[in-house]
Each structure stands twice: as C-alpha cells, then as structure tokens.
Image: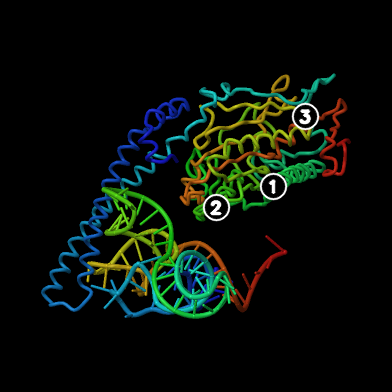
Amino acid sequence: MLDFKFIKDNLDAVRENIKNRNVSADPEKVVSLYDQRNAVIQELEELRRQRNENAGKMKGKLEPELRQGLIEEGKALKEKIASVEERMDVLLKELQAAAVLIPNMAHPDAPVGKEDKDNLEILRSGNVPSFGFKAKDHVELAEEMDLVDFENAARVSGSKFYYLKNEAVLLELALTRYALDVLQKHGFTLTITPDIAREEIVEGVGFNPRGEESNIYALEGTGTCLVGTAEITLGGYYAGQMVDLSGGPLLMAGVSHCFRREAGAAGQYSKGLYRVHQFTKIEMFAYCKPEDSDDLLMKLRSIEEEIFNGLGIPFRVVDTCTGDLGGPAYRKFDLEAWMPGRGDEGDWGEVTSTSNCTDYQARRLGIRFKDEDGKNRYAHTLNGTAIAVSRGIIALLENYQQEDGSIRIPEALVPYTGFSEIRR
RNA sequence: GGAGAGGUGCCGGAGUGGUCGAACGGGUCUGACUCGAAAUCAGGUGUACUGCUUGCAGUACCGAGGGUUCGAAUCCCUCCCUCUCCGCCA
C-alpha cells in the first residue's frame, strides 16, 4: 500500500504509474476519501474531548440535579460519537479498499511495457547446450529414468501433483542443501518456515487469500491458508514489529513447500513439473533501510546468478516491465533458465524472481525501524528465489541429458547428491 | 481435545468503574556532592497520530476485537498467545 499523503501529493505520478502498469485503480477516489477521513477524525476527536471533559466533571460528589444534567449531556455525546464512528468505519473500509488497488510506484529504470513480452533482456550467462540428438523434455526423461510419477499422483491427489522418485528425491534435497550453503555464506539466517499462515499475513504480504481467482488454498474454518511461497512467512515474521536495522539489512532464507491452485493453467508451456500445485522453494527475504534497497536488489540478483552459474545452467536475466511487475514490486528481475525440452527447440523458462517492494509491503504489514534521527520509518522489503526446486530439476534434467537418456550431475552438486549421474 | 491460571510501561510488579498514562521497585538519563568514581540525594524518563509550533494542547493505546456505562486497565462476550495438569500423538 502507498502512503495516502504520498498519493495526494503526487497524484499525477501515481496516475501515470497506474497507466504504465496497465491496471485499473482510482487515485482520485483515494484522495477524496482520505480528505474526508481527516475531517471526520478531527470531528471525532473533538467529540471525545468533550466526553472526557464531561466525565471528568463527575469525579467528586455532586448535587443530584447537577449530576443528572451531566449524565444527560454525556448520553447525548455518546450517541453523537457512535454515529460519527459509524461514518468513520464505512469511510475507512472504502479508503482501504480503494488504496490497496493502487500499485507501488515503479523504479525509473524499469522498462515501460504491458506484458511479459516487453520485459527487457539484460544479460545472458552460460552456454546453451547443442546436442547431437533431439533433446527430450523433462517429462520424457523423468519417465525413462523413473524419477517422477504423475499418474499415481493424479489418482491420489489430483492433476499437477507428482511423486518424486529415486534419484529425483535426492536431487531435491541436494539442490536445497546446495542453495542453503550459498545463502549461509552470504550471511542469511537460515529457516524452515511454517507452510501455513494466517489470512491477515497472506493479505498483508500482498496475496489475495479468498475467491475464485485466488491462487491460494484456504483451509476451511481455520482462518489460515497454505502458503504459496515463504515470502509470506518471512515477510510475516516481523509483521507489526520494529526491526533493528542498526547492524545493516536483515537477511533471511526460508525453506518451505509452496502450494498454488493454478486454476485454469494448462498447456504445453506449463506441462510436467513446470506449473504444479506443490513444490519446494528456498526463498530469500530482506529487511533494510530505504537507502539500501536498490543495492540489495542487485545483491539478491547476483546470488541467484551465482547459484545457477554454479550449477552450470545457462540463463538470461530480464528486467521486468511495468505491466508485469505485480502490485507490490518497485523493480523486479527474473532469471530464465534455458530449458532444451521446452517448446519445439528449447526455450527460456522462469526459474527465479527477485523484487524490491520498497515500503509497500511494510506499510501494510506494519514493519518499521528506528532511523538514525530517532524517527520510526517503514522498512523496505525485498524477496528473491534462491531456487524453486521443481523448476531447478527441469533445468538440470534437460540441460544435462545424454544421448542415451542418462543424466549427468553438475560437479558442484555431486557432494550433495552422492552420485554423479543418473542411469538405468 | 479436556480442566485450570495468566497476558499491565525497557524489566519486575500493584491496580476498589471516576483523583489512572497508570503505585512501588529495578533500569536508564540529567543535576548535586567528589580530584574522579562508588554510595547517597533531587529531578526527569512510553508510543502513535492531529493541531497551533523552539513548547504546548488534544486524541488513542494496559494481548486483539466487540459490548455494557454519562465514564472501563477495572464488568461482560469472542478471539489470540503463554504457563500447569490430563488425553492424544511424531
């Protein structure tokens, strides 16, 4: 959420940003409701002052008639206050509803564009493998090597679920462990987070926990949801609290399962493990002072690059355009790994994403820090994928496939897997 | 899941429906004493928002949200969390 006062003072820029992001939102309405709210606050505080004053007069002993008069006056004030409070409630709900639709401002360097096709490729790393044979996709490879079972998972749990089997199990654990080692080296506090979070937290982080269009599984009757990412649990970690940033940014890494409804998602580009209802992800999350968030975003991106470079998986980095940023992000970079089995001749597929959400998330979650001047300010929050394991497995299987269908394991991973190839 | 106890400021811990933003103790800050320190003594010491502005005034906040009342930290309801015991489990 943006600061109401900021919206009011920067109406043109906010309007321009909404247009660039290709969303519909009404900043004028927010400003109008905000002004109304402020007027009602003053009215309400004046009435409460009168009530307190009235109650104060009745502290000692009084003539009965005098007391009765004051009580009558108090009753009248009470009714007035109740009606103004009612008006306030309605106003606040409307203001909140209008304000959450306003997306975060975008970084001035973020490319302006409508959809993912407008994302700007800014670098490539690694060599796209050229096979002397027709590359298989991961579904075919996994089947041949008996690594993933989609069919029985569909019977037991539904479509887009899977059993990992045999070496794939160890591969998941190896990728997890490998990523955690990299993150620990960079100073992250390692956590395994809950896979369930309260609705308020889910909402505060910027996800919609309810409704047909929600990508979140709600747990009926509990007020909680399955998390779609550890961003929720890591962002919620300090919700409503003061964070101590005097020693620099707080860096947290979280291992969690991620659950996504993915209603209606189907087709060639989301087949196999690419788009599933459940996967394991290692997420980075950072809390920092406003002046540090631009640099920190670059650091998160470089860690993602380090992880994929270490695995020898070719990738490119795209600077996400305004229309594809999503509500909370101020700037976002995606790593897209080369997936030789994707499409007809291989294609790039998103494997990580890192965002600077500035104070947009923190304002809603109530995460602040005490700045050097003694003022409390909203922290900046950033998140980034270290590795989304299911997609990591796709990239590994497809890039390291051999002509006979066996899979090589990248050297950096062998200490974690304990084997250097998968072969039948 | 069942039974019980509890949640108050930086910490400990009082608090009869009005004199409670909150006793008392500790911590901490300022000043005095001292060559300096300790001890002692005196005074101050929450947060947020709003309005005039070097300060002051107002409003809110005693786990969260509702309710009763002219008036709630105090009474009632719901929820959350912590602790103890029992049950169940990994």
Please tell me which residue is depicted at 77% across the width and 43% down the height of the picture: A178
Q: Is residue A193 above or below residue A315?
A: below
Marks 1/3: CA distance? 32 Å
Residue A164 makes an appearance in the image: no
Residues marked 1 and 3 touching at CB (< 8 Å): no
Q: CA distance from mark 2 to mark 1?
A: 17 Å
Q: Position of residue A330 (x, y in %)?
A: 52, 34
Q: Which mark is residue A247?
A: none
In the picture shown, does residue B60 fall above or below B77? above
Q: Mark 1 against mark 3, which lies toward the viewer?
A: 1
Q: Position of residue A367 (x, y in %)?
A: 50, 50
Q: Chain of mark 2?
A: A
* Residue that numbered label 3 is attached to: A398
Amino acid type, mark 1: Gly
Crowding at mark 1 (Cα within 10 Å: few <14, some 14-19, many 20+)? few
Give the residue type at disc 2. Val
The secondary element bearing badge 3 is classed as helix
Residue A187 shows which numbered tag? 1
Q: Which quadrant of the figure contains the C terminus of chain A?
A: top right
Please determine whether, in this image, residue A413 is positioned above or below residue B24. Answer: above
Q: Which residue is mark 2?
A: A243
Left or right of residue A145: residue B20: left
Of callouts 3 and 2, which one flags the residue occurring earlier in the amino acid sequence?
2
- Looking at the rendered structure, the kind of residue marked 3 is Glu
Crowdedness of circle 3 by 10 Å Cα count: few (<14), some, many (20+)?
Answer: many
